[in-house]
Structures are given as structure tokens and as C-alpha cells.
Image (spheres, grey):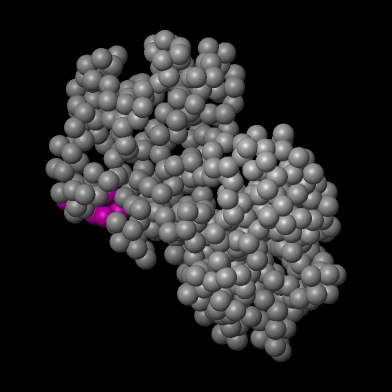
Amino acid sequence: MASARIVTDALPAPADPPDPRAMPGHLRHGAGISLLAWVLERPDLAEQRIAQGLRKDRRLGSKDRPWVADTLYGILRRRRLLQTLLAAGGWQGEQAPEALWWAWQVLVRRLPGDEAPVPSAWLRGCEDPGTVLEPWGKDREPWEWLATVGSLPDWLARGLLEDRDLEQALAEVLAQDSRAPVVLRVAAHRTTRKTILEALHASGIQATAGRWSPLSIVIQGRVHLPSQPCWRDGLVSLQDEASQVVASLVAPDPHSQVVDACAGAGGKALAIAATAPPQVQVIAMDIRKHALVEARKRARREGLKIRTLPIQPEGPVPLQAGTAARVLVDAPCSGSGTLRRHPGLRWRWDEATALALPDLQVRLLERYADLVAPGGHLIYATCSLWRAENQGVVDRFLAAHPSWEPIPIIELIDNTEARDLGRDPVLTMTPHHHGTDGFFAAVLRAPKTV
Ligand SMILES: C[S@@+](CC[C@H](N)C(=O)[O-])C[C@H]1O[C@@H](n2cnc3c(N)ncnc32)[C@H](O)[C@@H]1O
């Protein structure tokens, strides 16, 4: 049984009323409900659908769009909580977009329940959530609390509790309720962080040096990057700080080969190339050809050279085994550390597929480990907060390959800001503790002889 404080802390804070210059309420609600209905059909595509729907709906003005977007994101982040509160009032799933929309207005915007155009009994729980949640919670397991209050699928709620208690797990989920800041990575081969910070300040942008990566800049508030010269000139890229720290763990020696086996659109491959010593060859592989095309475009923008290599999901890898000094496996994962940016991601996987992710990750690690040269490093990373996808995968790999040796990350992180991260042998960054996306990374050294 969770404590009453957990319930109080977990309820969304009351929100401000809309701007008085916004459109009349009934039109705004109508537009929001239609958009919500469309988003609920494919919550895994929520961000795209919200952005597209807001752009297309000509009824919405500039004062309405942020309000509608905040409401939609709020509902997505708290859908299961709203459903539980509604169900206590007799709601059985009918008129879902309307019911959820008005439940949010009552719970967060303090609209009196009898002013909403749905049965007011449904909304009683949203007027006084404590009276519903306390009896509801009496016989519930911690994972049910987490799934409901944090609005997570059951498998993820259970997974997050594998190595934390309910309070810690809820803190990680709630830390992902707010919008992620814009974080830049400075192109270290072309300029310095100080120069870019000065340029941004001169344009009136509030920006500060990030705490964890020596190349990161955190922007406060919104910014239109395409109008910034540093963006146009390819001197900065978008990349979360934790992702930057993961890339820095690759740390290749001069004249060596680095393989980024799951490179996607090249976020980490480019971060590695930008800081690599001379004559390092970075090979970016992925099963998605179009992501690699994007990686090449981004490389051109930043003035970097990488080789891209599309590969098949199974079968032999078209590179010589045992030749790469560093192999990064930034594996496909639940993405449970990136819910700030992608609130709908939690609904992307059905339970069976999600529970099979750790097996896939072990297979990928096995597959790409073959490329590592004797004594070279295999870097395994995810943007997940679920132990089974993180240390669980590493433990399984090491059990099958006892001659591989974990390298404590403190040996690889050399900037003083980030040294605080090195107290554990592996890298664990989380939204709650570090204010970054959630990331895990472990570095394993291949045996010197095979
Ligand atoms: C977490 S994303 C990579 C993000 C990227 N490293 C970055 O920093 O932006 C995982 C990537 O793994 C790719 N992937 C999935 N299965 C794969 C496989 N069998 N081999 C290589 N890549 C794979 C996906 O297409 C996806 O781009």
C-alpha cells in the first residue's frame, strides 16, 4: 500500500487558466477533443499527431495551440490515473476522448464537474482524487500504483520496480512529466563551448554550460535554432547530455577503427567523430538505410567524415571480425528514459514484444562483440531505466563470456564535471537524479588473445 504522500505528490499540479485573448472555450475544447480522439488511436505516434493536428486546425490561434498541446500531453502522461478516477464514478470506457478531456479539466484546471458536458458522476473522483485513490489502493501491489499514477503499461511498471522502491520509481516517472530542455552539443573540432555561449548570449538567448558533458549547452526556454548562425554553420547539434556522456565513453585511440553498430541517424557516431583523435575511422551501421542517409547529411552539416554501412538484422556482418578497437552497441530498447521527449513511447510495445527486448539486446551484443579487436572495448548502452535491459543484459553477456572484463567508467571519463558519475562501475544517468534523459552504459574489455 502506497503512502498518502505518494498520492498527493503524484497528482498533477493545478494549471493556469488559458490566456484571456484565446478563442472561446467551447471551440478550444471541441478542437482539443477531436485531436485527442485521433491521438488515442495511435498513442505511440502521439508527438507527430499532436504537432500535425495543431498545425492543420485553422480554428486554433497562437494563444490556443500551447494550451491545447499542454492538455493533450498532460492527458497522455496521466491517462491511467484519469481512467481510474473516472471508473470510480461509473465510467465504463465510453466516449473516451470526451471523458478524458473533461476529467483533465476538472482535475488540473479545477473546472467544476457539473459544468462539463459529460455525466457529472464520472467526474466526482477528479474533484476529490484522494477519496477514490485511498480505498482503491488498499489491496494494490506497488506496481499497480506505479502503473496507475505514472500511467505506464504493466510490464514497465514492474520493470522499473526491479531495482528501486515505489517512491524512487515514481520520482523517475514524474521527472519525465515536464518538457525536456533543448540541449546542444558543440562541434569540438570547429569551435569551443565558450565561443558558442557568447554568441547565444549576444542573440539574447538564455543558455548555460551543461553540468555533465564538457561540450553541452542547455537552453532555457524556447529557441528557433534555424535562425541561429551557429546552427546554420553546423557548429552545434541537438543531443541530450547523457547521450553525449555515453559517446565520450567510446574514447578511441589515434589511428583506430570505431564501429557504431546501431547508429540510427548518427547522434553518437558524430559525437565520437567530432572528438576523436587523428586518423580514427568511424563506421556507422544500422538496419534502417534511411536513418543512415540522415546520418550522412548530418555529418556533412558538421563537416565530419564517417562511413555508413547498412546491414541486415541477422546474418554475417560485412566487416572483418576482431578489427575494431571500439564497438558501440546503442541498442534498441524500451526508451523508458526518454519519456520527457516521447510521452507516447510507453505505449509503443505490446507486453510480449517488450518482455523480449532483453533477449534481443543480448543477441545484438553477441553479434557485434565479434567485431572487437583483442583488448578492444565493447560499449553497451540503452536509454532505458529498466534493469533487465541494462545490467541484466551485461550480466548475461559476461556469464557467457567470462574472459571479457568490465572497465569502471571512472577510468574513461576525464572531465571533472562528470567525475561524479563515475562512482559506480557502470554509467547510470536518470531524469530525476541528473535532469537528463535516462541512459545506461557499460564498457567491457575483450580478452587480449582469443
Ligand atoms: C537507440 S537507437 C540508436 C540511436 C543512435 N545511436 C543515436 O545516438 O542517435 C537503436 C538503433 O538500432 C537499430 N537496430 C535495430 N536492430 C538492429 C540490428 N539488428 N543491428 C543494427 N542496428 C539495429 C535501430 O534501427 C535504431 O536505429
**Does the magenta-highlighted stretch encompass residue 181?**
no
The part of the chain drawn in magenta is 139-145
- Which quarter of the rendered picture does the C terminus lie within? bottom right
Using the image, determine if residue 9 lies above or below residue 421: above
- Which quarter of the rendered picture does the N terminus lie within? bottom left
Residue 234 image offset from top left, x and y in percent: 77, 47
Q: How many marks?
A: 0
Is 138 in front, or is 5?
A: 5
Q: Is residue 141 visible?
A: yes
**Residue at the image position 51 percent from the left and 69 percent from the top:** 421
Residue 315 image offset from top left, x and y in percent: 72, 64
Q: Is residue 358 visible?
A: no
Q: In this view, does 93 lie to the left or right of 76?
A: left
**Residue at the image position 14 percent from the left and 43 percent from the top:** 135
**Residue at the image position 21 percent from the left and 35 percent from the top:** 129
**Residue at the image position 68 percent from the left and 55 percent from the top:** 194
Q: Is residue 180 left or right of residue 194?
A: left
Residue 187 image offset from top left, x and y in percent: 74, 55
Using the image, determine if residue 118 lies above or below residue 419: above
**Does the magenta-highlighted stretch encompass residue 143?**
yes
Which image quarter: residue 111?
Answer: top left
